[in-house]
Amino acid sequence: MIEITFLQLYIFITILWIIIRMAVVINTKTFFVKREIQLLFVYVCIVVIFRFVYFGFHPENGSIPGLKVGLGDDIHDMISIIPFYFLTDRYDGWQMNIIGNITMFIPVGIVWPICFRKLDTIKKTVLAGAGFSLFIEVTQLFCLGRHTDIDDLILNIFGTAIGAWLVFLIRRKQKKESGNSKVIAKEVKKEKEALSN
């Protein structure tokens, strides 16, 4: 068993992020400060989500409890594959779990399609969020005291969908307004031409 502190994981993620971004810059031979600042929002999403899914919510002795990595005696106790089990077994904090899992992934649905051009539909964004959530749930199998739960996956996907819906609703509205202003500009131009003749 290995115990990892949040600081250690944070440093690892940060170093990995810097290496990946440097490799991309070297490979593409382009560097845009605006793009790197934009991508920092993706980095923040990852760090914040990792903080809450891998480490205890409540501090112990004034600090974030460590993450114990290894295989438990009975892995079956760490897996819940029954959807919406919390509706029948209302464990302590089930409401917070629902709200937390949805809220935590709303920024993924907002930030990722803004930062990644290939996520140009709600469906693609939700699939990306689902893949990220699935990665987290699978890796939690190796984290003692953490649980892999189908409900977490469903709620994370729902959170991503809410965020993506907001982004694409705003984009649709902006596109419609832009189209309307172009039509108005053409009509004004036609009127000016008619008056000058």
Image: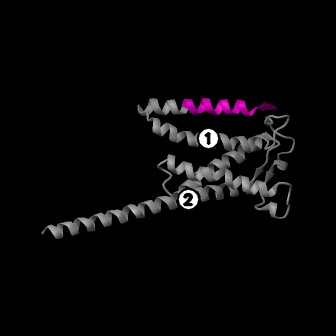
Residue 192, image quadrant? bottom left
> Residue 83, image x and y in percent?
76, 61
Q: Quadrant of the C terminus?
A: bottom left
Q: Residue at x 59, y 56 (%)?
A: 163
Q: Residue at x 79, y 42 (%)?
A: 56
Callout 1 amino acid? Val
Q: What secondary structure is marked by label 2?
A: helix
Tell me the amino acid under the disc marked 2.
Leu
Asked if one can make out residue 150 in the rendered structure from this viewpoint, the answer is: no
| Residue 32 location, quadrant | top left
x and y percentages locating residue 100 in the rendered image: 72, 52
Residue at image x 66%, y 49%?
133
Look at the magenta stretch and give its main secondary structure: helix
CA neighbours of label 2 inside 10 A, class few (<14), some (14 to 19), many (20+) = some
Residue furthest out toward the left: 197
Looking at the image, residue 127 sits to the left or right of residue 76; the answer is left
Q: In the image, which residues are magenta?
A: 1-19
Q: What residue is disc 1 on? A: 44
- Looking at the rendered structure, the secondary structure element under dot 1 is helix
Marked residue nearer the N-terminal end (2 or 1): 1
Is 120 situated above or below 181? above
Between the C-alphas of marks 2 and 1, the distance is 20 Å
Residue 9: where, in percent of width, then height? 70, 33
Q: Is residue 54 visible?
A: yes
